[in-house]
Image (tube, helix red, strand yellow):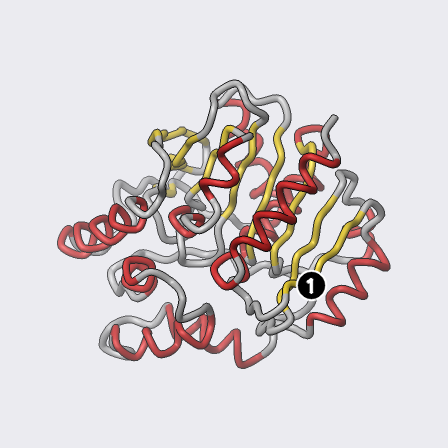
Amino acid sequence: MTTQTSMFKTTVGQARYFAAYDAALALWPVPTEALDVPTSFGVTHINACGPTAAPPLVLLPGQAISSTMWYPNIQAFSQAHRVYALDILGDMGKSVRIRPFTAPADFGDWLVEVLDALKLESVHVAGLSYGGFIAARLALSAPQRVRKLVLMAPASLLPIRRRFFLRMLGMLAPAFILSAQAKQTLLLGVYTPSMAPAIRQMLTTTDFRYSMYLPPVYTDAELHSLAPPTLLLLGDKELIYDYAAALNRARTFIPNLQTALIPNAGHALNFDQPEIVNQYVLEFLKTHAE
């Protein structure tokens, strides 16, 4: 088994990133508890909040953005839920990878280990983009562990458009190829200008040891096998694929599906229209309460 003590190339880079991370986490208007959960894939860092006895809600972030991305939503989500916002192993954040993900099933195995460590039998799961791909993987691998599934612009519904894919590759380039300022320009084309400066700074780090698994498109059979009640949220300004085609594919194959198109929202729809997203998510979880 490969061991790794840091996800950063330099201590200076790590300190700079952690300062931005902590500044972004300070935007959360609720008290948080930092948890570090060991798994066979690495140590998973979690920002937890909300009443401990409330129904659990696991949040999975988009690529390169960390669990701090939920600052526009966390107050609403944590009022009626115990929220566990994870930093994805191998991606930017405070989690520390031991071994990489090499197949989609690894993500389900990892999350089952996290849930076992937290002593959570079943949870609501919500994910944006890359996090949506991972959330769906848990529902496929261990459907009994997922009460409800919320997919926000998931990265696995359709092939990603070439221009979006190239932008994300640019974000991974070392500093001698692409400066932090140039990455800021790419960032605004991928996510949204409404992001807090601390989030933007995290996204443009050049010292991170990246090992992100590129998500494949889910097959028709896999989508049809998604058993939990599922909410799909897409923005009408979506960048990574055609939202109409994505909605059509989801409605064709996902059996227990509710969909909503968010107006004036791009890929990072939780930033662009947080109040609307919060309303859809909370109403969905409440309506489908067991």
Quickly name the residue at label 1.
261
Q: Residue at x 46, y 58 (%)?
A: 63
Numbered marks: total: 1
- Measured as percent of width and height from the top left, residue 90 is found at 41, 50
The quadrant of the image that shows the N terminus is top left
- Residue 215 horizontal/vertical position (percent): 59, 59
* Displayed quadrant of residue 49: top left
Left or right side of 120 for 285? right
Q: Is residue 88 left or right of residue 201?
A: right
**In this picture, is 31 found above or below 164?**
above
- What quarter of the picture does the C terminus occupy? top right
Q: Which secondary structure, mark 1?
A: strand
Of the pair 94 and 259, the residue shown nearer to us = 259
Residue 275 position, x and y percent, is 54, 53
Residue 285, image quadrant: top right
Residue at the location (50% across, 28% down)? 82
| Crowding near the residue tagged with mark 1, few <14, some 14–19, many ≥20 C-alpha atoms within 10 Å | some
Q: Is residue 216 above or below residue 45?
A: below
